[in-house]
Image: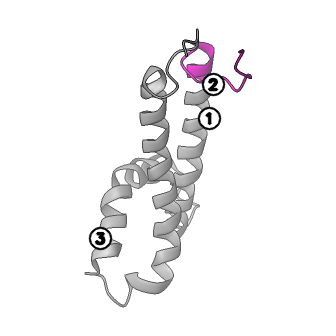
């Protein structure tokens, strides 16, 4: 069955890869914040804690640098998650403007 629509996955691969990569970092920032209550002080060498820090530290550090010192460093992973979400929305709107995102329109027979 031939259609005029492009392949849903391969045609929008840049959108999927970037969006899911940024979503991974965003949700790992949230996970890092909540995992701190269970692991960080008691087991700093825990491999799960270290992996969350390794996945998010590259983003949390620059966000901490530009965030006012009024914000407690304890909340910095949540602030980083917020800015990652804002970046994802801005990226989506930009890619949507360029026509690089899949549409939700119904397929024609």
Q: Find the distance from the CA under tag 2 to the CA under tag 3.
A: 33 Å
x, y (%) of residue 43?
Answer: 32, 87
Specify the label residue 93 is tagged with: 2
Q: How dense is the environment of label 3, judged by Cα within 10 Å: few (below 14), some, or many (20 and up)?
A: some
Label 3: element kind:
helix
The prevailing secondary structure element of the residues shown in magenta is loop
The structure residue drawn at horizontal position 49% and vertical position 21%, both measured from the top left corner, is 7
> Which region of the structure is painted magenta?
94-109
Location of residue 28 with respect to 101 vertically, above or below = below
Marks 1 and 2 in Cβ contact (< 8 Å)? yes
Q: Residue furthest top?
A: 4
Q: Find the distance from the CA under tag 3 to the CA under tag 1.
A: 28 Å
Q: Which residue is mark 1?
A: 89
Q: Earlier in the sequence, mark 2 or mark 3?
A: 3
Q: Which residue is mark 3?
A: 50
The structure residue drawn at horizontal position 60% and vertical position 40%, both measured from the top left corner, is 86
Location of residue 29 with respect to 90 vertically, above or below = below
- Location of the N terminus by quadrant is top right
Q: Is residue 45 toward the left or the right of residue 76 in the image?
A: left
The structure residue drawn at horizontal position 58% and vertical position 62%, both measured from the top left corner, is 71
Q: Is residue 57 magenta?
A: no
């Amino acid at each position: 069955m031939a259609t005029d629509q492009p392949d849903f996955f391969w045609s929008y691969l840049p959108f999927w890869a970037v969006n899911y990569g940024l979503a991974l970092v965003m949700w790992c920032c949230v996970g890092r914040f909540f995992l701190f209550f269970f692991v960080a002080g008691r087991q700093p060498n825990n491999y799960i804690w270290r992996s969350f820090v390794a996945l998010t530290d590259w983003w949390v550090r620059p966000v901490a640098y530009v965030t006012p010192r009024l914000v407690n460093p304890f909340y910095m992973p949540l602030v980083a998650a917020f800015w990652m979400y804002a970046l994802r929305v801005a990226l989506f709107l930009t890619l949507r403007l360029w026509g690089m995102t899949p549409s939700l329109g119904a397929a024609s027979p």
